[in-house]
Each structure stands twice: as C-alpha cells, then as structure tokens.
Amino acid sequence: MASLGSVPSVVLGFLLVFLAGESSLRAEAVVRVVATTSLVGDLVREVGGARVSVKSLMGPGMDPHSYQPTPSDLRALQDADLVAFHGLHLEGRMQTVLQRLRSRRAHVVAITEDLPVTRLRRVGEGDGAYDPHVWFEVALWRECIGTMVGALVRADPAGAESYRTQGEVLRMRLLALDDWVRRELAAIPPERRVLVTSHDAFGYFGRAYDFEVIGLQGVSTVGEAALSAMTGLTQLLARRRIPAIFVESSVSPKAIQRVAADAGVRVGGELYSDSLGAPGRSADGIDPSTYEGMVRHNVRTLVSALR
Ligand SMILES: [Zn+2]
C-alpha cells in the first residue's frame, strides 16, 4: 500500500497548490444570493462585494409587477443561501412564493422592510397600500442599505466587517448622487417640472425633487391603459403645454406614443423605471445596469427634454 512517504514530492506539491487554489476560490464568493429584481441585485452586489455571487431573476426591461417565476427560478430560490426581494408588493405575482419562502427559511429579506411607513407614499388600502417605487428617491433607497447589510451579516457573520464597510461606502456615494440629482434638475424651471410616463412609478421622485408626476396607469402595470385615461391625458397635455412625455424601459411604449402623437408633443426619451438597463456604457460614460447609472441616465434625459 502506498503511504504518503512514497508519493513523489512533485505530486505532493501539485496537490498542495490545488488545495490552496480551491480554498481561495471559496473565499471569493461565500454567499449565493438570489435577488428578484435587477435593482435589488445591484444593492446586494454593492454591499456584498467579492464575498457574494448574485443572480437576479428579472433581467433588463422585465416588469416586476407582472413577472411570474419559472420552474428554474423556483429551484434557484430554494438553493440560495440568501433570498433578497423588494417587497411592498412590487413583485405582485410572486407574493405567494415569497411569503412561503419567508415562513420556511431563515435567510429571506425584503429590502424595504425597515422603511418607516411615515416615509412611504400611501396609494391604497390593504395589500399594495404603499407605493413600492422607493428607489426613485435616492435618500430612501439609501435607507435600504442597512437592511441589506443586516441580512448579509446574518447569513455570513464572518464577512460582517466587509459588509459594514461597503455599506458605509455606498451610503456616502448615494449622498453625493442625491446632491448631483438636485443640482442637475435645477436647470428645469418650476413650470416645466411635469413628468408624464406610462405608469405611476415616479411618485417618490416627484415628492423628493419637486415634480408633478402623471402616470397613464396606476402604480401597477397589471392591466392596460384605459382609453378614457389616454383621452384625458391628451387634453391635459394640450392645456398645460407640456413639451415632452416619456416612455419606460419596462413597459410597452405604445400607449405613450399614441398619446404623444394625438397631443402633438414629443417623446422625450426612455426612462428606466422598474428595471435597470443592459450592461454597457453610453457616450457620456453612464452604465445603466447599475443603480447610479440608471439615476444619472434618467436625470440627464429629463433635463435635456424639459429644460
Ligand atoms: Zn412599477
């Protein structure tokens, strides 16, 4: 029988290098996180850094209100070390699945769960009482960082220091981003601060940055824009002399294009609403596959169409 003593030293050397490589690989991504939306995935990536691997179930342009999980999504959710979702009924058609996961598993977090209700926009009664689109108020999205840090620390206590540091760095960056948004938007005069889009995603944006927001549909995209809403909007645009209206990346542009044509106003561009964009950089260096890039793209688009 071969003892270790009879193994040639060169083989032993390879074995040691192989084992060392294996353990450093594990140290790179410790926690496998499954996120529902691309926005939640971005927050996990920012706070988790190299210790996490992130899979977002919904890619660019996907609408979280109507998204239904596939069998492979369900398997990924089962196998994840941590599941991070948005909450506030944004994932309208995944509610049952998410609630069931939450009752059975330890590491499941809704990143909006610690937001004080006093800072949320009330839009109805019962389920879906609060507007879920909190990311459009940078200061409110910043409040979700602590919840993400807490969930990662619980799932991976050894990484606590790293998650807290990265959370702190992100808080600083978002503070600077919020300042930038205010400075840029100052170029739009008060009477032109009207944001017309496909659905009511920009309520928090309007509240935070002083815009009147008009959505063709309500806070959810489930169902189609009513003809009466389209006619009403067409009349309002003419009356108020609004220069441009906007389509959204995760909602079909048809209704907005139709209204723009009927009212004789310009489509001012495409805004990212409920999902981030595809990875890549625009001419001005903006990567819309990140939260920061998405905010910058939207603000630039608004400023150039409404200033
Ligand atoms: Zn929405």
Image (cartoon, rainbow, N blue to C red):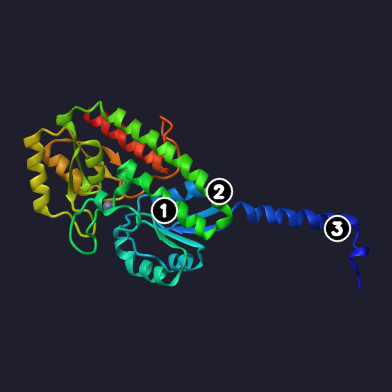
Q: Is mark 2 within 8 Å of ligand 1?
A: no
For residue 182, above or below residue 47: above
The image position of residue 256, as x and y in percent, is 19, 45
Q: Amino acid at mark 1?
A: Thr
Q: Is residue 268 visible?
A: no
Q: How many marks?
A: 3
Front residue of 52/67: it is 52
Q: Amino acid at mark 2?
A: Glu
- Circle 3: element type: helix
Q: Earlier in the sequence, mark 2 or mark 1?
A: 1
Quadrant containing the C terminus is top left
Q: Amino acid at mark 3?
A: Val
Which residue is drawn at the image coordinates 22% and 46% (left, top)?
203
Which residue is drawn at the image coordinates 47% and 51% (left, top)?
149
Residue 108 falls left or right of residue 253: right
Q: Which mark is residue 11?
A: 3
The answer for how far apart the CA atoms under marks 3 and 2 are is 38 Å
Closer to viewer: mark 3 or mark 2: 2
Q: Which mark is residue 36?
A: none
The answer for how far apart the CA atoms under marks 1 and 3 are is 48 Å
For residue 134, above or below residue 155: above
Discs 3, 2 touching: Cβ within 8 Å? no
Q: Earlier in the sequence, mark 3 or mark 2?
A: 3
Q: Which residue is mark 2?
A: 161
The image position of residue 216, as x and y in percent, is 17, 49
Q: Which residue is mark 1?
A: 147
Quadrant containing the N terminus is bottom right
Front residue of 264/139: it is 139
For residue 133, above or below residue 185: below
